[in-house]
Image: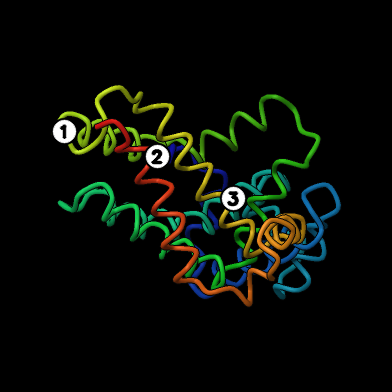
Amino acid sequence: MLEKKYHKDAFERADDERKKLILEIGIEEFSSKGYESANINVIAKNAGISIGLMYKYFATKEDLFITCLKYGMDILEKALYSIMVSDDKLLVKAEKLIRTICMHSKKHSNYIKMYNEISSEKSSVDRIRAIAEEIESKRSTIYITTIGQALASGDVRCDLDPRLFALFLDSLLTTLQFAFTCDYYREKFRIYTGIDVNESDNEQIVTQLLKFVESAFTYGK
């Protein structure tokens, strides 16, 4: 992710327990109400701090939102990074990615809900660009690099474009995340499969999605 900080130095000096509490409460507020309706005063109150202290930590609600977003996504990014930099073949990595996404989405549903809220917000171009850069830059680089390496070693079909395939792979995994956590995508899953995703067989999801990915990456190889 980018090095730019969206919090003030005072927030860094706060103890870890307080920082985690503020961010977790912020994530709950943003994920349940969306950016526009979320109230920084409510977040401060629920975190047990004054609104004055909150503004000593964050200059704006937007800065708090992006900090919360980064905090939630970093947890998943660390897990994905360890998979992608391993020596495993690409399809082995893909299977591990899918399993990690399933587990993470159930365990940290609020983080994914907040991520989904971004797409429905009416925001300035600059804010959308800043948020997209913070969330997508590191992950896209990892995916593109990994697929490029698999291409160079002959593990995947020779006619694929690493950048486009990275985008398509991430889109599949993002949709899977949303299916576990967001009402619209959960209903979409039900319409297509006839079952509630929370009652589905995770092993079947992993197996079928992996077959889809394998077909895309190796067909005609």
Contact (Cβ within 8 Å) of mark 1 with mark 2: no
Q: Nearer the viewer, residue 94 or 52?
A: 94
* In the image, residue 167 above or below residue 179: above
> What's the distance in space between the residues labelled 3 and 1, CA to CA?
28 Å
Residue type, numbered disc 2? Lys
Is 31 left, or right, of 203 in this rendering? right
> Label 2: which residue?
138
In which quadrant is the N terminus drawn? top left
Please, what is the three-letter code of the amino acid marked with disc 1? Gly
The residue lying furthest to the right in this view is 37
| Residue at which label 1 appears | 154
- For disc 3, the marked residue is 175
Position of residue 71 measured from the top left corner of the image (x, y, whole percent):
52, 57
Could you tell me how far apart the alpha carbons at marks 3 and 2 are, in whole angstroms? Answer: 19 Å
Query: Residue sitting at 86 percent across and 53 percent down?
Result: 37
Give the structural element (helix, strand or loop) at label 2. Answer: helix
Query: Of label 3 and label 1, which has the lower sequence position?
Result: 1
Horizontal side of 82 relative to 73 (left or right) equals left
Q: Disc 3 vs disc 2: Cβ atoms closer than 8 Å?
A: no
| Kind of element beneath mark 3 | helix
